[in-house]
Image (cartoon, rainbow, N blue to C red):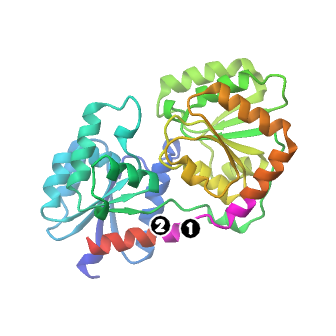
Amino acid sequence: MNRERLLRFVVPEGIDDPERVSGGNVYDRRVRDGLAATGWSVTTTEAADADAVAAALAQVPGGGTVLVDGLVAGWAPTAVASAAANVGVVVLAHMVTEAFAGADPLAVERERHALGHAGHVVATSNWTARELVRRGIVPEQRVTVAMPGAVERALDGPAGHGEPGRLLCVGAVAPHKGQDILLDALGRLNALDWSCTIAGSRAVDPDFAERVAATAAPFGSRIRMTGVLGGAELAAAYRSSGVLVAPSRAESFGMAIADARARGLPVIAAGVGGIPESVAGGGALLVEPDDAGALADGLQRWMTDPALRARLRAEAAAARARSPRWATTVERIDRVLGAA
């Protein structure tokens, strides 16, 4: 195999761990497997800290190519800068840290340093790419957008809709995903007929997850916190639900939203970050972020207005055919790596 088809991919530890499911991990796995299928010989290194990142980068031969997840690149910006002097360094940016309220200034500075020294940056949404350029982190000519793909089997199967009051929220139970906002909103809708499944890992922020679980307990069986759901279980949850709820405080794109779109499932979401981009084409009701009252109003409209539901379902079904494919994602990254 030609040397230019050898690739080291440096990712966070545990990307295949079912208890650490995240949009970033799903994206990394799809890219890893897709690049291997296109002829790259991919050596994946999982890193738990800055020393592990530096060691992985040091193993790339001069003139070689390395793809680095943006999270781990931010842990070791000096190592990224040093590697970029000898090898083709491409950083995969799932987010822009400084775009989110309350960001750690040290993390912001490290991310700026790492991305600024990369030969090229792949952004997972147009919003992320715009933020990188607007904030002066990376010049426009060094950014390529490769949006996440959709679930192919969902695209090929029939669209289904559960009862309007069957709500689904998918994502790691963590502050940026806003499950606490969702519970606050649902507490204002006790008179309506609803149930809610909250699916996602509780390992990302155990203290927050414990508080969410405690808040959910008085609702009894109306709220199910399932933890991480596997492929078949998650697919069943989507099929039986009437709407996906994404109450995020911060979001670069929203993998759960992409999966819902692939299934023709309407979405009620906070209009923050890259979410408006991920629901372009209709089928979604956007509300003010970090506002339980606004989310409650949106949920009430969905559950009580048949005309609104019919419109959103029709729009979601039409948008389904335009869902991006993972093959396109991999093709764009393949071109960037080839140039690197």
For label 1, the residue is 325
On the image, the x and y values in percent for residue 315 come to 74, 57
| Dot 1 crowding, Cα within 10 Å, few <14, some 14–19, many 20+ | some
Q: Mark 2 — residue?
A: 329
- Label pair 2/1, CB-CB below 8 angstroms: yes
- Gap in Å between the C-alphas at discs 2 and 1? 7 Å
Residue at far bottom of view: 1
Q: Quadrant of residue 8?
A: bottom left
Q: Is residue 276 left or right of residue 308?
A: left
Q: Position of residue 99 (x, y in %)?
A: 39, 39
Badge number at residue 205: none
Over which residues does the magenta segment extend? Answer: 317-328
106 or 280: nearer the viewer:
280
Q: Residues within 10 Å of mark 2 (few under 14, many from 20)?
A: many
User: Residue 114, percent across and down?
Assistant: 23, 49
Most foreground residue, 29 or 307: 307
| Amino acid under disc 1 | Arg
Magenta segment: does it hold 196?
Answer: no
Q: Is residue 100 above or below residue 261?
A: above
Q: Is residue 162 visible?
A: no
Looking at numbered disc 2 in the image, what kind of residue is underneath it? Thr
